[in-house]
Every structure is written in structure tokens, then in C-alpha cells.
Image (spheres, helix red, strand yellow):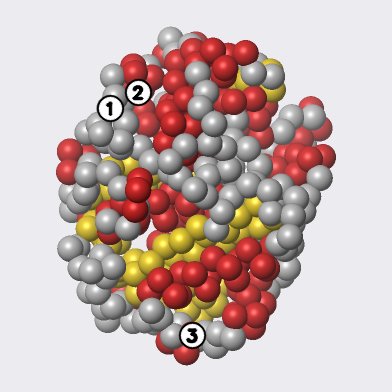
Amino acid sequence: MNTQAHILSAVTTKFGRRDDSTTLDLLAEAANDCLTMAGMERRDIDGVLCGYATTFPHLMLATLLSEKLGLNPAYAHGMQLGGATGAAMVMLARELILSGRCQHVLVVAGENRLSGQSTDSSMQTLAQVGEADLEVPCGASVPTYYALLASEYMHRTGLTKADLAEFAVLMRHHASTHPHAHLQNAITVDDVLQSKPISSPLQLLDCCPISDGACAILVSARPGPVAITGAGQAHQHQHLSRIGDIYDTGAAAAATRALADAKISRKDIDYLGIYDSFTITLAILLEELGFAQRGQSANDVRQGKFSTDGPLPLNTHGGLLSFGHSGVAGGMAHIAETWAQLAGRAKDRQIARKKQAFIHADGGVLSSHISLILRATGETA
């Protein structure tokens, strides 16, 4: 039995359009860079966890990737949990380490979702998060589900479209300093409000872009610069029509479990990595998770609370909204960036060193929730 699980390395490929790369190419690129960063030999990897890819729905992707990389794991597993998959895989990797089942687990996800899949195909795939008999036949897709959430939430809290736009502007500002980010040009609140309508009240810049890219994270029993000290899940519904209370989607329950696992409270957190598929996703999650008061998250953005020099830096890589969304890898990038900041490996993007980070990912329509607590150990990366 191991007493702690650590992240030895975490990397992303460049996100954006990668016409020359297949899904397997992207997965291999991230995995190889991750192993190189950690100085880990392939023969030492005894666990491989791999996220699903909509552009390459292979039934045994974890073993296929292991074969391509020349790995011989004692444990391999593929996982599907929507946008929460990456965090769920890191949570499982930690459990495998703590149980003694594995010593070094490689967690990988990625796909060429932008160049390898048509827009219509992507929309059709994502629409399946809807209830098959009651929601999907109405023609709705993921942006519409979140637009409906936004309408109700804005009505109840008083948040406005201009408030939501603040999140898009902040994420773009953070992405402008990351060389791997899909979108880096500066935008304003007015740019967001004047962008193409997608599904009222959401505009184009309220939505994350579809990207090619991959991410890999190495979780190990070996001491490293960042420890995984807490984790929690919650799954209270699958479909939009089954959300009982928009103020209680399951995010708070997952967070409570993770914080209890780590034996800390919210006041001990000094960095945030929060899933942000849409601007409304970020507003809802920050407020339900307790890092902003109801209806006040946008005011917190304006006051600098979530800026790189603020008390709670948020998604300093630009999040899904600007770094990009390459399926499971998009959510995993939050973890990779958090690791880089805690480990002091963010290079020109390095902010003042933080000690404890809270990460949250959701899948579906705020359906599956995973919270993680990461702590800087002071070990050399």
C-alpha cells in the first residue's frame, strides 16, 4: 500500500488545427513528451488509462495505444464520462497507486476533433447527451442545453450576457501567454456580445472552440512536485430535464467529498482549475462550488479575484474557452496547467507559486462531477 500519489509530469500538445496528425499521433506525442519530462522508462509504466475519442472510437484504445508506445501495462482501462473523463482518470490513477495495484500510471487523452470530424458529425455525436425520447428529437445539441441552463440561471441570479462575457475575456487574456493555446488574440466584452448568435443567450465567444490536441499526465508512487491529496465525485442526473435544482447540480457534493478527503477547506485553496465549456458553465460552477457568491462571479472577475495576480488565479492557460476543447484532453489541460503552476514549470507564464489547488470537471449537462485537490510538495520536478 502507498500513502500518497504524485504527479511527476503533465503535458499538452499544441491545440488548434493539426491536419498532419491522427488521433493516435496526438496521443503518442503527448505520452512520449510526458515520459521524457519525468525521465521515466517505458518498462516502468504498469498502468495505462486512456480517454475515449469521438473521431477514433476504437473499442480498446488503452491497449492499442500501449501497443503503439511499446508499453506492457499490468492494468489498462478506457473511460467515458464526457468532459469529466480526464479528472476521473486521474482520480482512478490515484486509487491504483494508493492500493498498490500500480506504481506508475500514464493517463492520456486526445483526438483530432477539429480536422478529423465534420461539424455536422461532431454536433450529432455531442447531441447524444440529450434524453433520447424527449430531448434529442427536438433537435437540440449541447450549446442549446447550456443556453437553456443559462436562461434559467440568469433569471434567478440576475447575471447578464455582459457578465458572462467577462469570463470569455479573462480566459482569452490568460491564453494569450500560452504557446499551445488554440485562440490567443485579445477580445473585449463587446466582441463577445457582437459575435455570432449560437443559441440565445449564448454567442459564439461564449462557447469553446473545437480543437485538435492531446494531454498526458503521469501519476506515480514516486515522490514528485505535486501530490493528489483529495478527490470526490457526484452524479445526480444525466439529462437536462432531470436536473432537480439548478443551484444543486452535484458539483458542490463532489467538492465537499474531495475537500474532506484532503482534510482541508475552501479557504486553504489558492489556485483554481474549473471546467469552462461555456461561459455559463464557469459562472454556475464557481458559484455552486462556493468560490463566488450567487450572481457575483462576474463581479469577482472585474475585481481581479481570478486574475493571475489575484487571490484565486483561474485557468491560467485559458481554459476550454480559449486554450481549446479536444474532447477529453480539453478538460485534462486544466490539470496539466495546474501541475505546471504548482511545480514551478510554467516558464514565462509562471505566476507566484501556489500551494493547494482545486480542480473541477463536469461531463454532459452538468451531469458527472469530479473534484480533485492538488498540493505542491516542494520536491524537484
Pointers 2 and 1 in contact (CB under 8 A)?
yes
**28 w.r.t. 201: above or below:** below
Q: Under tag 3, what secondary structure? A: helix
Is residue 126 in view? yes
Residue 305 image label: 1
Which residue type does callout 1 highlight? Lys
Q: Mark 2 points at which residue?
A: 301
Q: Under tag 2, what secondary structure? A: helix
Mark 3 / mark 1, whichever is N-terminal: 3
Residue 42 image label: 3
Q: Tell me residue 229's x, y (percent).
A: 26, 60
Q: At x 79% / y 27%, what residue is drawn?
A: 138
Query: Label 1: how many residues lie within 10 Å, few (<14), some (14-19) or many (20+)?
Result: some
* Front one among 225 and 148: 225
Label tally: 3
Quadrant that contains the C terminus: bottom left
Residue 146 quadrant:
top right
Q: Is residue 53 left or right of residue 250?
A: right
Query: Label 2: how many residues lie within 10 Å, few (<14), some (14-19) or many (20+)?
Result: some
Q: Tell me residue 312's x, y (percent).
A: 26, 35
Q: Tell me residue 177's x, y (percent).
A: 43, 41
